[in-house]
Each structure stands twice: as C-alpha cells, then as structure tokens.
Image: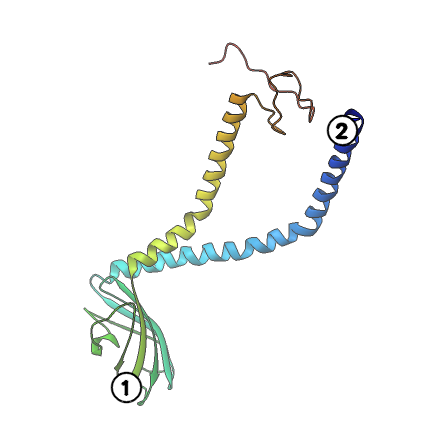
C-alpha cells in the first residue's frame, strides 16, 4: 500500500512545489525588490556617515566645527570637538545671535555654542548659552564610526556565514553518505536515491 501511495504523493508534492514556486515569483518578487530598496538606502547612508564621521573625527583634533540650521525661535545642529560628536537642539529665549539659515562656526578647542557651556555630563545634558536653552546628545566619534562600519559589513558577513554553512553541510553529507538533494541515507543504495531519484556523483579514485 505504501508503494502505491508514494508515487502519487511525490507527484503531488512536485506539483505543489511548482505551484508555490510560480506563485511566489509572481507575488513576492516585486516585494523583494521593494524590501531591498531600504537596505540599499541604509548602506548608502551608512557609507556617507562613515566618511563624514571619520573626517570630523580627524579634524576635531585641531579644530572644532558646528553645522546648524538656525531660525529665530530655535536651532538644530551637529558639533565635532575633541574626538566627540554632539547633536543639539536649542530653543531661544533671547534674540537670535547665530544668524538665519545654515550656519557654520569653527574654532579650537571648543566652538559656539559649547564655548559657553559647562563640560558635558553623560550622554544627554542641557545648558544655556548664547540666549538659548540647549539639549545635547554627546557620543565619541569612534563609537558612531564603528556602528556605521558594522552596518556596512553586515551583508558580507551574512553571505560568508551562508557560504561556510553550505560547505559544512556538503562535508557532512559526503561523510555520512546522504543524498545531496533530500538527505536520504544512501548507504544501502549508493547508486541512486530511492526518495528523489538523484544519482550521486562518483568520486575519482585518483583524486586526493
């Protein structure tokens, strides 16, 4: 009874695999393309961030820079100084002394607005300077650079891991005498897999 049912089951499984495969190609191939777009944008942003952070990291050893968007009521910007990166937002309680639009300040060892602030206390801190209440997030530049590099090498590492797994699986299949396609034990039938019909590759006895 098992012999009469097995061929029908195998043909049904093959039919379902073809059906599911075609359906997945039709329905999910555009979705895979859409899913890859955010990853490409993420890697592009990480690449640009690596370049900028490394540049500011090196430059901060002899000069501090502030790049900000300034408006009459608030200011948002980034500062690099002494190997650290500061992201800040300020709300003004006095007239604007920074100018309107994109502004850039440079100096050493600190630059506006940090030239009038106390020393940073922890990751997040606040202080008043230049008629503005600031909230600041401070991180070492090397930590941000490491995060960006890890984002960039994530996919190569994943591809390397998949390659190593496939090689280990191939070695295990060869060592245990299993079918490469379905994993059936071929020690009793080494010339042909009775489950999927695959013919194993014969090794050259002269090869090492």
Residue position for label 1: 131
Q: Is residue 186 above or below residue 8?
A: above
Which residue corresponds to the image point at 41% horizontal and 55% vertical from the top-left? 47
Q: Residues within 10 Å of mark 1 (few under 14, many from 20)?
A: some
Would residue 150 be found to the left or right of residue 198 on screen?
left
Q: Which residue is mark 2?
A: 6
Quadrant in which the N terminus is drawn: top right
Horizontal side of 37 relative to 137 (left or right) equals right
Q: Residue at x 46, y 54 (%)?
A: 43
Residue 101 makes an appearance in the image: no
Relative to 7, residue 188 above or below: above
**20 or 134: nearer the viewer:** 20
Local SS, label 1: loop
Residue drawn at point x = 69 percent, y = 51 percent: 27
Q: CA distance from mark 2 to mark 1?
A: 82 Å
- In terms of depth relative to the viewer, which is nearer, 26 or 124? 124
> In this orientation, which residue lies closer to the viewer: 155 or 106?
155
> Which is nearer the eye, 143 or 180?
180
Give above or below for 35 relative to 181.
below
């Amino acid at each position: 009874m098992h012999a009469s049912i097995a061929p029908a089951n195998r043909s049904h499984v093959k039919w379902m695999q073809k059906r599911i495969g075609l359906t997945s190609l039709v329905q999910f191939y555009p979705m895979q393309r859409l899913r890859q777009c955010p990853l490409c944008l993420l890697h592009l942003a990480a690449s640009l961030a690596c370049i900028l952070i490394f540049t500011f990291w090196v430059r901060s050893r002899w000069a501090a820079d502030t790049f900000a968007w300034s408006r009459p009521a608030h200011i948002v910007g980034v500062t690099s100084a002494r190997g650290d990166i500061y992201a800040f937002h300020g709300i003004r309680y006095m007239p604007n002394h920074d100018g309107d639009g994109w502004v850039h300040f440079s100096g050493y060892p600190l630059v506006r607005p940090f030239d009038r602030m106390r020393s940073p206390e922890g990751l997040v801190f606040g202080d008043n300077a230049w008629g503005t209440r600031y909230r600041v997030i401070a991180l070492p530049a090397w930590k941000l650079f490491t995060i960006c590099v890890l984002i960039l090498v994530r996919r190569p590492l994943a591809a390397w891991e998949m390659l190593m797994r496939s090689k280990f699986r191939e070695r295990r299949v060869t060592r245990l005498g299993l079918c490469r396609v379905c994993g059936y034990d071929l020690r009793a039938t080494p010339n042909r897999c009775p489950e999927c019909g695959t013919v194993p590759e014969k090794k050259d006895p002269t090869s090492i």
